Image (cartoon, rainbow, N blue to C red):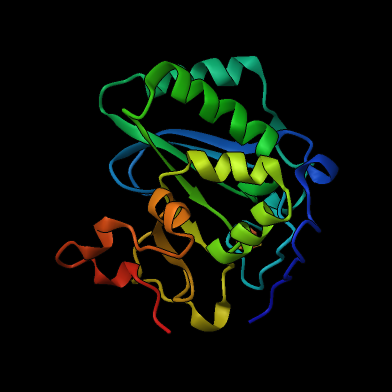
Amino acid sequence: MVYRTPRPGQWRAQDLSHDRVADYKPFVMVDGEGVRCALYVSGCTFACDGCFNRAAWSFRYGRPYDDALEERILADLHHEAVQGLSLLGGEPFLNTGVCLRVVRRLRAELGRTKDVWCWTGYTFEQLLAEVDAGQHDKAALLAEVDVLVDGPFDAGRKDLTLAFRGSANQRVLDARRSLAQRRAVPWAGAEAPGATDLLATA
Ligand code: SF4
């Protein structure tokens, strides 16, 4: 496994992010459950060997997140066929300015009728440590996420048969229950027949 591991509070969006996005894809069916709107933010410091999206390591990659893009995303999210918003990267928890802006708008207009999935290089336990270290922006984003796909990509444990994740160390978690219980709780979809591969293997 080759990737960087931060100390709690070491990496902060306020120091790193330029509020830029690498891509936005409406009505996709691969980034989570159901039909989704997927926002890819720019910038990631985990530097995982074998990362699928190296171009998005730079916080200056892509284009600025602006009002026009936000209006488009919200209009797409209002479509009744859309189940929710997916936040990917880059690293969403190092681009909390963008992610909190779009998620708060989603909650204000659509409440919990839409879900939020988030892919992060942080493990859930690392995010808890960030919260405990007073990283309020990470805490605020974590509180809005429904499903968290956590952990860095480990090329040594790469498995292309896994749903929603690229390596076996990564987990698909029920973020709200995990936060309430302060322990990693698998997403209920992982318990569905044929979906047992959503649980990380030790
Ligand atoms: S956390 Fe994700 S985006 Fe960042 S380097 Fe690792 S695989 Fe790439």
Q: Viewed as shown, does residue 41 lie left or right of 103?
A: right
Residue 133 to residue 38: above or below? below
Q: Quadrant of residue 100?
A: top right
Residue at (74% x, 61% y) in the render: 8
Percent from the top left, x then y, of residue 162?
A: 35, 69
Can the viewer see residue 17? Answer: yes
Could you say which is closer to the camera, residue 172 or residue 69?
A: 172
Q: Measured from the top left, where is residue 200 in percent x and y?
A: 40, 74
- Establish if 156 lies above or below 65: below
Residue visible at 60% across and 15% down in the picture:
68
Q: Is residue 88 left or right of residue 193?
A: right
Image quadrant in which the N terminus is located: bottom right
- Is residue 95 at all visible to an observer of this figure? no
| Front residue (pair 178, 70) | 178
Pick the quarter of the image with the C terminus.
Answer: bottom left
Give the camera-side residue of 154 and 114.
114
Residue shown at 67% from the left, 55% from the top: 132
Number of labelled discs? 0
